[in-house]
Amino acid sequence: MSHKTLTRMDLSEAVFREVGLSRNESADLVESVLTHMSDALVRGEQVKISSFGTFSVRDKAARVGRNPKTGEEVPIQPRRVLTFRPSHLMKDRIAAGNKS
Amino acid sequence: MIRSELIQIIADENPHLYQRDVERIVNTIFDEITSAMARGDRVELRGFGAFSVKKRDARIGRNPRTGESVHVEEKHVPFFKTGKLLRDRLNGK
């Protein structure tokens, strides 16, 4: 698959086209959305966007890891990880759009 | 936090915008990400994370109740990888 990579710029461009704010303000709004989502997640909240998906924070216990190259044991500290569960609508759209 | 709460926060921060425009802005952002992935594109949002599409090969599945083999077609699924900055923030760094 030779595909494009979209960035914040493409999202602000889409907002700019859709609502007709300035490019600057569109960029600020995209940033603001990402910041508020991140802040909620850092507070430990779930972020649930209907028909898009759910971001949730999970606690991982400490465990003994291993360096796969040297076989050396290294302790892995307990940590918080973020998981994203796509909605059915998103899964269906992605499956349909990428059908070969 | 749910979509409507996110919209409300952004609306409160931008009193010069109509609520319905804030709604369109937020919806456009999520819709653009999904549309990109539906085309097979990646969406990389530095510091937050990256959305991409992963291919799952066709396989012989099994009906767990009857043990019967079924052919499962190749399919594409959405995938999200957390960005470094957000991962660090989640762990208080």
Image (cartoon, rainbow, N blue to C red):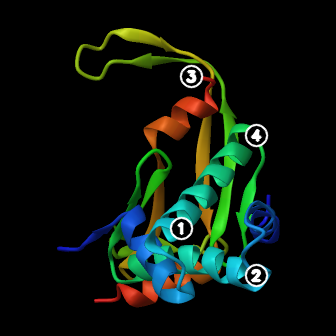
Closest to the camera, between mark 3 and mark 2, is 2
Q: Chain of mark 3?
A: B
What separation in Å lies between label 3 and label 1 (alpha carbons)? 30 Å
Q: State which quadrant residue A87 falls in.
A: bottom right
Q: Chain of mark 1?
A: A
Between B92 and A97, the one lying in front of the other is B92
**Which residue appears at 47% of the width and 66% of the height?**
A24
What separation in Å lies between label 4 and label 3 (alpha carbons)? 15 Å
State which quarter of the image contains the C terminus of chain A: bottom left
What secondary structure is found at the residue carrying circle 4?
A: loop
Q: Estimate the x, y position of residue A17 in percent, counting from the top left.
A: 46, 86
Closest to the camera, between mark 4 and mark 3, is 3
Q: Chain of mark 4?
A: A
Please name the amino acid that badge 1 sits on: Glu
Please name the amino acid that badge 4 sits on: Gly
What secondary structure is found at the residue carrying circle 2?
A: loop
Q: Are marks 1 and 2 in contact (CB under 8 Å)?
A: no
> Which residue in the protein does label 4 denote?
A44
> Which residue in the protein does label 1 denote?
A25
> Which residue in the protein does label 2 denote?
B18
**Which residue appears at 65% of the width and 83% of the height?**
B24
Mark 3 vs 2, N-terminal side: 2
Closest to the camera, between mark 2 and mark 4, is 2
Q: Estimate the x, y position of residue B74 in percent, counting from the top left.
A: 35, 79
State which quarter of the image contains the N terminus of chain A: bottom left
Q: Estimate the x, y position of residue A68 in percent, counting from the top left.
A: 29, 23
Crowd tier of the residue under label 2, counting other residues whose Cα lies within 10 Å: few below 14, some 14–19, many 20 or above: few
Please name the amino acid that badge 2 sits on: Tyr
> Which residue in the protein does label 3 denote?
B93
Query: Does residue A29 sit above or below B82 in this rendering?
Result: below
Q: Are marks 2 and 4 in contact (CB under 8 Å)?
A: no
